[in-house]
Image (cartoon, rainbow, N blue to C red):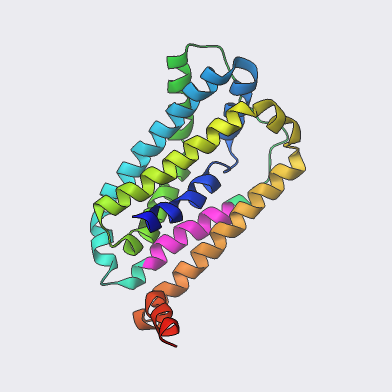
Amino acid sequence: MIDDIQAAIPLGFLLSFMIGPVFFVLLETSATKGFRAGVSLDVGVIIADIVFLLIAYFSSFQLLENLSNEPGLFVFGGMILLVYGIVLFVKKPKKKANVKASKGTYLGLLVKGFLLNFINIGVLAFWLGLIIVVGPSLENNPNRMLVFFSTVLLIYFGTDLLKIILAKQLKRYLTQERIVLIKKGLGIVLIICGIVLIIKGFLPKDKFDIKEKIEKIEKL
């Protein structure tokens, strides 16, 4: 369980810096309306992620069951991550974020955060690809997957709290050039992960058994 938590921590941190409309609205809301408003918006975003995660998990349950016997299905998850990464890398940035914080109650901001995240179908595709990639390494165990993805979301939310606190400073340093570099960097990471998964899907299982390789090294 400790290993699952440790593996989830960097992923949660990385997800918090996926640059998109939600990222800018969160900074804008936090800088102009305060900490509580930013948290309210972010809670809505997290709820949307949880909904997408549940949809992705239950829709891919049978796929996860088959994945242990058919490693070639790794290609499916790898293709999702690869396409997502390519889109991030080649997508041209907009000159200005066209979403602004608007007035509203905390409940209204929560709903706004939920809808901003929920209307992005790419988020569902990302969670689906991630579940297919991570599931076999967690032995498709529901308890281990619960621990892993709960940790991802907790770290994601915790990092967002820091962004909310530092919203004004972050807005100042996020120049257009730096935003482009961050997006391209995240895109490259996803592309590499996708390619690795696709290669793993085409190779025989015994040729890509990392655990077995580690055990052999330890015996030396």
Quadrant where the N terminus lies? Answer: bottom left
In percent of width and height, residue 17 lies at 58, 42
Quadrant where the C terminus lies? Answer: bottom left
Residue at image point 69% right, 37% down: 94
> Residue 162: which quarter of the image?
top right
Give the extent of the magenta segment.
74-87
Residue lying furthest bottom: 220
Residue at image point 75% right, 35% down: 173
In percent of width and height, residue 137 lies at 35, 64
Q: Is residue 28 left or right of residue 68?
A: right
Main SS category, magenta section = helix
In percent of width and height, residue 25 lies at 58, 27
Q: Is residue 83 covered in magenta?
A: yes
Q: Is residue 21 visible?
A: no
Count the marks: how many? Answer: 0
Front residue of 107 and 97: 107
Q: Is residue 56 above or below residue 194?
A: above
Q: Is residue 110 left or right of residue 191?
A: left
Q: Is residue 100 covered in magenta?
A: no
Front residue of 180 and 9: 9
> Residue 213: which quarter of the image?
bottom left
Residue at image point 33% right, 59% down: 135
Residue at image point 54% right, 23% down: 38
Q: Is residue 184 visible?
A: yes
In percent of width and height, residue 113 lies at 47, 26
